[in-house]
Image (cartoon, helix red, strand yellow):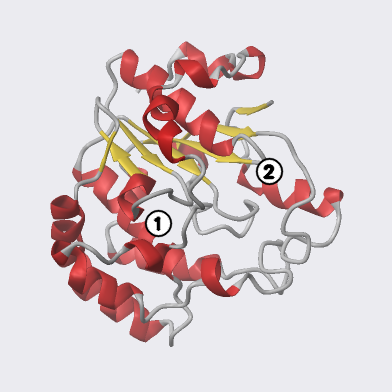
Amino acid sequence: MKIPSIMRSLAVLPINRQEIPLFAKWRPFLLISSRPISTALSGSQELKEFMEFMEKLKNYEKTGVPRGAGTDSGDGFDLGRMRRLLHNLGNPQSKYKTVHIAGTKGKGSTAAFLSSILRAEGYSVGCYTSPHIRTIRERITLGTTGEPVSAKALSSHFHKIKDDLHMAVEREKGHLSQFEVFTALAFSIFAEEKVHFAVVEAGLGGARDATNVISSSDLAVSIITNIGAEHLAALGGSLESIAVAKSGIVKEQSPVSWF
């Protein structure tokens, strides 16, 4: 697939939040605290079984991330878990081109900005961001309209792959996290929906983030937004180590841009 020219000139593009439809849609809720996965799964009977499954998994958004977990070191998260899970799901992340975004500030707005542009150009886009504001379904938006995945569609896809998920949880002996499972679910939904592009925001750092399983050949562009002091313990304790962790999404022979 031909990569749109927008991907080759990202570094000089300003981001105007007023021009992004998602910001207009979310503006009334911006004072509501963002929520971890488990707190917004209730309230939908269609997601009841999914909620019960997810509640059994590790939830680092609620408990906090271990020291060094986001660094490319012996303390870092094991990406092997994600690779094994995605392999069992048929490697859905290889079925489309991905824009991968990491950074301290501006990841979500950059993802919304690019998704909006690609949709305006007629592409079907899957966008994966975190955390959410009102419902977990906001983390996955789809198609040419950018609407959050419906509870019915999320539940339906969960039931299609739940046997693989249960086997993965058993195989990984309880180490699989909610974020890893939901990331795999998002990638699988994007493949099923046959999106042209996935715009994916890294959750923590980059190098050892669950989203960092995209091969160079499947990567449209890696984007690094600005770098600041966040999650210091998890990302190595310094601005330099944070920058190194976030730059871990950059792949050899693939485009990279930064803001």
Give how far across and how far down residue 149 sits, in percent: 24, 45
Q: Which quadrant would residue 125 be assigned to in this image?
A: top left
Element class at badge 1: helix
Quarter containing the N terminus? top left
Question: Residue at image x 40%, y 78%?
Answer: 57
Rendered location of residue 50, percent (x, y): 24, 69
Indicate whether 6 appears above or below 47. above
Q: Is residue 181 visible?
A: no
Kind of residue at disc 1: Thr
Q: Residue 144, can we see it?
A: yes
Q: Which residue is disc 2 drawn over? A: 104
Q: In this view, does 226 lie to the left or right of 169?
A: right
Mark found first going from the N terminus, 2 or 1 = 2
The quarter of the picture where the C terminus appears is: top right
Residue placed most toward the observer, 41 or 59 = 41
The mark found on residue 118 in the picture is none
Look at the numbered disc 2 and give the secondary structure of its residue: loop
Distance from disc 2 to disc 1, alpha carbons, whole Å, reads: 19 Å
- For badge 2, the amino acid type reads Thr
158 relative position to 205: left or right: left
Quickly name the residue at label 1: 183
Q: State the residue at coordinates (71%, 52%).
A: 245
Which dot, 2 or 1, sits closer to the camera?
2
Mark 1 neighbour class, 10 Å CA radius: few under 14, some 14 to 19, many 20 or more = many
Mark 2, Cα crowd under 10 Å, few <14 / some 14-19 / many 20+, is some
Identified at 19% across, 47% down, the residue is 150
Q: Residue at 29%, 31% (x, y): give it.
A: 146
Q: Going by the image, does 1 lie left or right of 69?
A: left
In-image side of 219 versus 255 (left or right): left
Q: Where is residue 38 in the image (x, y as percent from the top left)?
A: 39, 68
